Amino acid sequence: MSTEGQIQLKIGWDGRQITAAAVVSTRPVLASMVLEGRSVQDARALIRRLYSVCSEAQAAAAALACDLAAGV
């Protein structure tokens, strides 16, 4: 499976200020395949090793997602 894709940042500008912002990604979501069937604790520990760029941000996002899924 290819890990290629693009991340595009789209910014709306009215000539004076930013009016909108969006992130569009065509990159495949491969982490879900590695995390399927693991416990929450194992998945949270593995996240930092899956991402070499922004590993702390990915870990924080994963922790928040786990907490939200658990209703915390």
Image (spheres, rainbow, N blue to C red):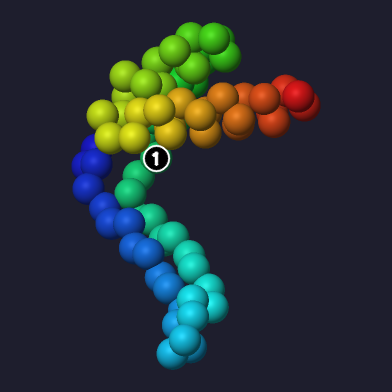
16 left or right of 6? right
Q: Dividing the picture into quarters, in which one does residue 52 lie?
A: top left
Answer whether residue 12 is visible to the viewer in this image.
Answer: yes
Relative to 28, is 61 above or below?
Answer: above
Of all residues, the one furthest to the front in this rendering is 16
* Front residue (pair 69, 63): 63
Q: Position of residue 57 (x, y in %)?
A: 43, 34
The residue at the point 48 percent across, 9 percent down is 42
Residue designated by label 1: 29
* Front residue (pair 2, 9): 9
Other residues around mark 1 within 10 Å, as few (<14) / some (14–19) / many (≥20): few
Of all residues, the one furthest to the bottom in this rendering is 15
The residue at the point 28 percent across, 57 percent down is 6
> SS for tag 1?
loop
Quadrant containing the C terminus is top right
Relative to 26, is 42 above or below?
Answer: above
Answer whether residue 33 is visible to the viewer in this image.
Answer: no
The residue at the point 77 percent across, 26 percent down is 71
Q: Dividing the picture into quarters, in which one does residue 7 lie?
A: bottom left
Q: Inspect the image, locate mark 1, and give the three-letter code of the amino acid beneath it.
A: Val
Quadrant containing the N terminus is top left
Say how many tags the image has: 1
Relative to 51, is 14 above or below?
Answer: below
Q: Position of residue 59 (x, y in %)?
A: 46, 26
* Front residue (pair 4, 15): 15
Q: Position of residue 24 (x, y in %)?
A: 41, 61
The residue at the point 44 percent across, 90 percent down is 15
Q: Dividing the picture into quarters, in which one does residue 10 lie?
A: bottom left
* Front residue (pair 27, 22): 22
62 left or right of 65? left
